[in-house]
Image: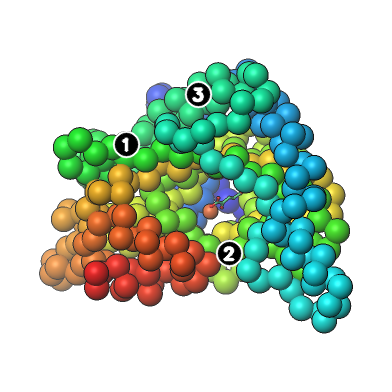
Amino acid sequence: MAIPVIDMSKLNGEDREKTLAEIANGCQEWGFFQLVNHGISVELLEKVKKVCSLCYKLREEAFYKDSEPVKLLNELLERNTGEKLENVDWEDVFTLSDDNEWPSQPLEFKETMVEYRRELKKLAERVMEVMDENLGLPKGYIKDAFNGEEGCEAFFGTKVSHYPPCPQPELVNGLRAHTDAGGVILLFQDDKVGGLQILKDGEWIDVPPMENSIVINTGDQIEVLTNGKYKSVWHRVLAGTYGNRRSIASFYNPSLKATIAPAPQLILDPVTKEVDQAYPKFVFGDYMYVYSTQKFFAKEPRFQAVGAI
Ligand SMILES: O=C(O)CCC(=O)C(=O)O
Ligand SMILES: [Fe+2]
């Protein structure tokens, strides 16, 4: 069993219907799929790998000297109780958005990542339009829902993560299991070092590295918007003894002010034709407030909690 690999260029030719169906299946049955021939140039992707790795090199010493996971793992090993670390992730991470401070080194970092984010945002919007079409929603429905009211704009963030080699990977997670809070996530994984797994039918299965592919997954807001048709899927990253795994996750999320609710077109039971709205309507900022303390727990209580606000 392997997560679907979909050739996105085929959307433009005679295989369009088949490719739409593959994406629908990826969203509905898997919640994760890999896109190849997605239109982002190899040249740009190679530059992104290079600048992110260089950037990490400048952070590496601090990771091993002062970071929370390293300190906690050392303390745990001193106590020698056989416990596992449950409250921390073995990762080095920073986030890029349109209005935060970015690393100033290496010099090509900024220009490369500006271009990368511009391209990835366009790719996210293309993927969302395919979802609109597959769901029978008007073109632009998901994007408009994420933009919210006049004057608000969807949030596009990019999280640059490294999972450095860990001396005791059985005692700590690279990233603890969770579902993503937001909308559509586009992940540019390491070429060689694996570790990402998704929970499928009760089993953890690998999302294998695939050079220059982009992994797509959907978050809790797509689950709400689709009234549960496209479920957000649990995933985690295992720590490893060898290799430093790089992964660059870009999140296309609603504006914090956007109101999110199941699409009216998707709340009718196909058989009884009765209204069956399985999720509440809420403001995304309220959801993030709940998520900030409940990220690594089951999502259903989050929907309940935000519905009660
Ligand atoms: O690093 C990865 O491959 C996954 C990252 C992730 O799941 C997240 O940032 O939410
Ligand atoms: Fe995630």
265 left or right of 33?
left
Please determine whether, in this image, residue 17 is positioned above or below residue 162.
above
Amino acid type, callout 1: Glu
Asked if residue 162 lies left or right of residue 5, the reply is right
Give the mark, 2 or 3, whose residue is nearer the N terminus. Answer: 3
Give coordinates of residue 229: x percent, y percent: 33, 59
Q: As shown in the figure, which amino acid type bears the numbered disc 3?
A: Val
Distance of mark 1 from mark 3, alpha carbons? 23 Å
Q: Amino acid at mark 2?
A: Ala
Tag 3 residue? 114
Colour scheme in use:
rainbow
Residue 177's label in the rendered image is 2
Label 1 residue SS: helix
Front one among 307 and 269: 307
Question: What is the residue that sits farthest to the bottom in this orientation?
Answer: 81
Which one is in front, 285 or 233? 285
The quarter holding residue 77 reads bottom right
Can see residue 259? yes
Residue located at (30% from left, 45% from top): 255
Looking at the image, residue 273 lies above or below residue 212: below
Q: Residue at x 72, y 53 (%)?
A: 67
**Dot 2 lies on which element?**
strand
> Residue 129, labelled with which disc?
1
Is residue 70 left or right of 301 when viewed as pictured?
Answer: right
Q: Nearer the viewer, mark 1 or mark 3?
A: 3
